[in-house]
Image: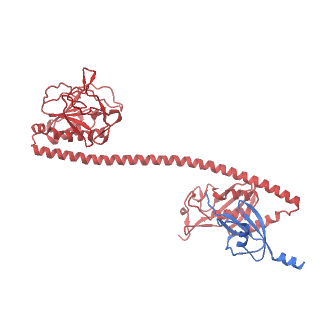
Amino acid sequence: MTTDLLERERAVAVKVVMMGKNVTTFHGKEPLSLGDVLAEMGTTGNTEVRVNGVTVDKTHRLTSGDMVLVVPKIRGG
Amino acid sequence: MSAEGTNVPSLSEAPLQGNSPDGGPRIPSEFSLIVECGKGASPLSAYSSALGPIPEVLTHYADRLRVPFWFLGRKNGYSRSLRGEAIFLHHFALPTPPVLFGIWPRVPPTRLPFAFGYPIAPAAQQAFPPGAQIGRGHLLRDQEGQGVAETVTGNIYFLFNLLGQDGELRCFLLRRLLDLGLPQVLKELSTLSPLGLEPLQDTLETLRRETEEAATTWSRQRQARVQQAYLQECRSRVHGETAFLEQEMQFIEDNLEEYARRITGETRRLSAYQRRLNTLRGTPSQHEQHLKDLAELKELPEVREVQIQDGRITVFTTPLRAEFDGREFHLGSYRMEISFAGDIRIHNLTDALGAYDHPHIYQGRPCLGNIREGIAKMIGEYQIVVTVYVLLDFLKTVNTKDWRIPIAYWQEVGS
């Protein structure tokens, strides 16, 4: 029981929006970095990534409730 | 003045034959034009305007050489050589009959597309070819080897239709013919002119150089006119194609908007089915998440205010900047209207440039480029907050390849 609670405390749930594809909730264990999520989601390098609307480094540590937005490099028409 | 063996009426006495295609008086098929020199010469206004620059050129040569000229035209292509107190110029004629008994083409006509390097008018390319028939004169060729004239003691025969050419070309062709032919009748010139042989030769050389210089100038002018016409044609084509492309782009834009609306609708249908499925499976509602997202949206530093009414969410931004080429530009504050049906309008409230709200927005209609479908899907999924994130990124990004107006028109930060 105690182990379960500890596991739940350490779990991190972030919302991942891959524009044009899907919106999912990603569950991972602390410490969870942006790079971990991107590697797990299989994103290519030709995208731009924001966490809560801000550009951050791949080593940025995510916390529960963060929103990761993955968009292609924007090219207005 | 008298000439042996000619009773051709002067041009002023000859009957005019209707009108030429350009509306001017037509040159009669038979004529003679006498160009005197010195004080006895007629004023240029005495000559028919249909002759174009012929009298002017002949008067100039007559004055300089102090020799009168007779310019003759015969309708059957045969003009007897004359003797008298003038140099005789026979227009488009031979010193021997080209047709015998009215039926036998002794000298069959040919075509002369170029004379002295100038293109001859297609409708007037008839010419007499060089030949060895009895009575033919001494053949004169232009620099390209084309037979263009013949001389017979004091007479110069033009072998092509000089008067069929347009005015400017006539002038240069006549000058070239005179420059080519007069040295061949130098003996007769020296007997007619009070100038001596050497001054005559010098004058002929001077006239030839004048012709060269005038021809060079005319060539440059013609080239300039051609260039101007070409540029005009290019501009016209570009203008036409631009109008076509703008029309097509507008059509495609309308189509894309329609497709975006469809994507939104279909995505929404998919989401509705997903929600229904989740409900059936006992998944909690996403309403709480939507409310949380909206609160996050209001917290964004670029968002000044959010309003929701009439089926759309309206977001007012703070003044935005975009970076391009190492420089930052002040774009102004925007109002983004995101319709839940999928339409998006973005208006620049403070720094619009005419109909341009942004390098990629014209009259409030954004050209979303590669994110159009993604945006449409996100609206369909009610991911409005994420949509605003992306649209804010869109506003802060410019793409030189497809922009409608360069960002340099906006004020640079710090300028």
Residue B90 location, x and y as percent?
21, 32
Task: Look at 30% across and 40% down and name the residue there.
Answer: B169
- Along the viewing direction, whichever of B258 and B152 lies nearer the viewer: B152
Residue B125 location, x and y as percent?
32, 34
Task: Look at 76% across and 74% down and name the residue there.
Answer: A63
Above or below residue B165? Residue B350 is below
Residue B157 location, x and y as percent?
21, 33
- Along the viewing direction, whichever of B401 and B142 lies nearer the viewer: B142
Q: Quadrant of residue B290?
A: bottom right
Task: Look at 43% across and 49% down and name the residue there.
Answer: B231
Task: Look at 10% across and 43% down and name the residue there.
Answer: B197
Q: Colour of chain A?
A: blue
Image quadrant occupied by the N terminus of chain B: top left
Residue B367 horizontal side relative to residue B243, left or right = right
- Along the viewing direction, whichever of B414 and B256 lies nearer the viewer: B256
- Along the viewing direction, whichever of B359 and A34 lies nearer the viewer: A34
Q: Is residue B49 visible?
A: no
Residue A67 horizontal side relative to residue B86, left or right = right
